[in-house]
Amino acid sequence: MTFLKVCFLIFVKDLKDEIRKKENILASLFFGLLSVVLFHFAVDSTEIDLSKDGSGLLWLIIIFAGTIFMQNLFKKEEENGTFYALILAPVDRAAVYLGKFAVSFLFLLILEFFLFALSFFFFNFPVLKSFFWLLLILCSINAGFSALGTLISSLTVNQKGSFILYPLLLYPLLFPLFIAAVSLTQRFIKAQLSFSEPWLRLVILFDIIFLTVSSLLFELITEE
């Protein structure tokens, strides 16, 4: 099979599994909903400045909710005993990684639209100010987040205490991406974004490096 066909088959298989089982999706969405509602009642929405504190809190919710989903990416293979069968299949292992990556990317995009819509309802977040720039921010951040999240999920799949180990490995690596996401969102709210934005170029560079490195590392990890 061709590389792209393997990626597509892994993506479709995992997407169907997630939709059928629903545990990971519902847990992440419910966590995001609960966090935004608690945030709404914990602060005075008339005084909070979305261009400062609000952006950081919103991205923290996205990262925590996304972690709930991504740390279980390989869980079904572990439970069914098919993880080794998957990596021993006569296909390019990078294609397996990219199929899982695509599932993470799509879910994060759905999660973010859900949370930004809630933020629009509760805090009058300017989602409709420039949909193009918002989509560009989300896609660029998701690429790096999904690349790291998928790789670390494969690293911790057979480890004891993986629910603790996963965030301990992921969050330090995500720190520069989190800072960039907050900064870009703040500039989006102020309508000051442009293609020459240094944070945007940094995120794109981050995406290219970590997606490439993660694909190569996945092949090395699964050989051990």
Image (cartoon, rainbow, N blue to C red):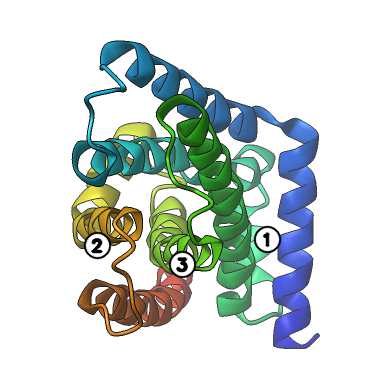
| Residue under the image location 44 percent in, 34 percent down | 124
Give the CA distance from mark 1 to mark 3: 41 Å
Residue placed under numbered mark 2 in the picture: 180
User: In terms of depth relative to the viewer, which is nearer, 188 or 146?
Assistant: 188
Distance between the Cα atoms at labels 3 and 2? 14 Å
Q: Which quarter of the rendered picture does the N terminus lie within?
A: bottom right
Q: Which mark is residue 133?
A: 3
| x, y percent for residue 34 | 46, 18
What secondary structure is marked by label 1? helix
- Crowd tier of the residue under label 2, counting other residues whose Cα lies within 10 Å: few below 14, some 14–19, many 20 or above: many
Please say if 171 is above or below 117.
below
* Residue drawn at point x = 72 percent, y = 83 percent: 4
N-terminal-most mark, 3 or 2: 3
Label 1 with label 2: CB-CB less than 8 Å: no
Q: Relative to 34, does residue 218 appear above or below in the rendering?
A: below
Considering depth in this image, is 112 or 216 the residue closer to the camera?
A: 112
* Residue 139 percent coordinates (x, y): 49, 65
Q: Secondary structure at mark 2?
A: helix
Distance Cα–Cα, label 1 vs label 2: 38 Å
Residue hosting label 1:
85
Q: Nearer the viewer, mark 1 or mark 3?
A: 3
Q: Which kind of residue does numbered mark 3 sit on?
A: Trp
In the rendered image, which quarter is residue 123 located in? top left
Q: Residue at x 23, y 43 (%)?
A: 168
Question: What residue do we see at 56% from left, 53% from top?
Answer: 109
Q: Amino acid at mark 1?
A: Ala
Residue, far bottom: 2
Q: From the viewer's perspective, is 160 left or right of 116?
A: left
Any part of residue 74 in sight: no
